[in-house]
Image: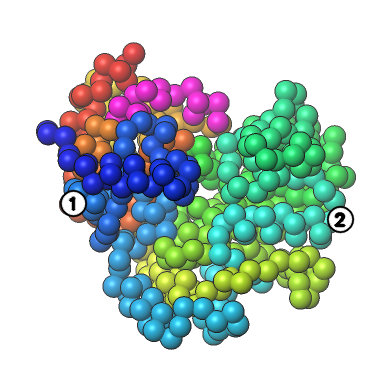
Amino acid sequence: MPRQIIDRSQKLFDHAQKFIPGGVNSPVRAFRSVGGTPRFFTKAKGAYLWDADENRYVDTICSWGPAIVGHARKEVIDAVKKAAEGGLSFGAPTAGEGELAEWVSKHLPSIEMLRLTSSGTEATMSAIRLARGFTGRSKILKFEGCYHGHVDSLLVKAGSGLLTFGNPTSAGVPESFAAETLVLDYNDTDAVKACFTEHGSEIAGVIVEPIAGNMNLVRPVPGFLETLREQCTAHGAVLIFDEVMTGFRVGAQGVQGLTGITPDLTTLGKVIGGGMPMGAFGGRSDIMRQVAPLGPVYQAGTLSGNPVAVAAGVATLKIVSEPAFFETLGKLTGDCMQGLTQAAREAGIERFCADSVGGMFGIYFSHECPKSLDDVTNSNREAFNRFFHAMLERGVYLAPSAYEAGFLSIEHLGDPIDIILKTAREAFKEIASVANA
């Protein structure tokens, strides 16, 4: 197949790099992990994207999750138009904020009260401050490979020993901030117990992606989330489920609905904004009542609860609450992953596997699905990079990093899935020698 023409994307990228660091406003978009020129997109509809050179792609990112009902869904666009016609922002309360909050609380029983923000990062930052304010403690426990936004105290990697405090992973983060963060391997239940034995009286909260998506899709092993709940309850710490990615993505009640494990606080984003900037944090009312103006934990945002974003979120959530929505989405995503695995085997590639939960998926050039960041790191990333470009040049847009999960929408049912699988069969044959190296 001839290479796509990407002259316009290249020119736009060259121009952007003169004024924007790396030419992008979020690092993964720069294609540094996979190489090549990032595509600049001009429009999207259903399961498809079109770049500046008018190349069409099947989208398997869906704006990193929010476009679960498909791009430019009529009901969502109509709601946004109606809201925008009334004004873009008031800096004052609107009825839609209460409607969205009630809808979320109804579907996620662990959230008795919530506060809207403008991003997932704001939500996690605020949840951590709230956990500290509620408990009067300072230390937070997080897990290697889980990303919770660019919050200073969370841009931290594990230290050299099991129970040492974290080290900053970004310039500009003081070591004193990192010193308040404990970092353990994801899915290491024994380490969690040991950590609480050593530091339990100092830990304000535990924050975790209950199904990880920022080191690719990594499921919790049996007992891991249960141990977090048990240890937090025993030691008076706040358990925070970061469901910015998984909330209303893997099921109608997020991971907490799938597992039956109730967190004290939950952070949300992406889907609840329907593609507009939106986040939220919420949970037990006794904890949430510590947030200003009711309590001493300050949190604010000029554009929080933006009426246009709220309208997009409410319209999206109404669609995903329709009967059989998640059953259909989960089946089409699971069928796609099975098809990819079969295509890899037909090409003679044994070191490949795939997994999915709801509309969220992971593909790995390894013999088995990962359980930790180390497992992901040890996969064949060169094979992924080759596969990424082989798919991209044939019109399928994958996440430009082996460390990112992918996402499908309800609009992928039918032709888009067929295109993905047909394209993958060709791509696997092209990269088979690298994948088996």
Task: Give the extent of the magenta segment.
Answer: 373-388
- Under tag 1, what secondary structure? loop
Q: In the rendered view of the protein, which quadrant contains the C terminus?
A: top left
Disc assigned to residue 54: 1
Callout 1 environment at 10 Å: few (<14), some (14 to 19), or many (20+)? some
Which residue in the rendered view is the most extreme toward the front? 18
Q: Is residue 156 above or below residue 64?
A: above
Q: In this view of the protein, which residue sits in the foreground, 304 or 284?
A: 304
Q: In the rendered view of the protein, which quadrant contains the N terminus?
A: top left
Disc assigned to residue 136: 2
Q: Find out whether residue 374 is within the magenta segment.
A: yes
Q: Give the residue drawn at x 50%, y 52%.
A: 245
Q: Is residue 8 above or below residue 186?
A: below
Q: Give the residue drawn at x 82%, y 48%.
A: 138
Q: Give the residue drawn at x 32%, y 20%.
A: 435
Q: Is residue 94 above or below residue 295?
A: below
Which residue in the rendered view is the most extreme toward the top? 437
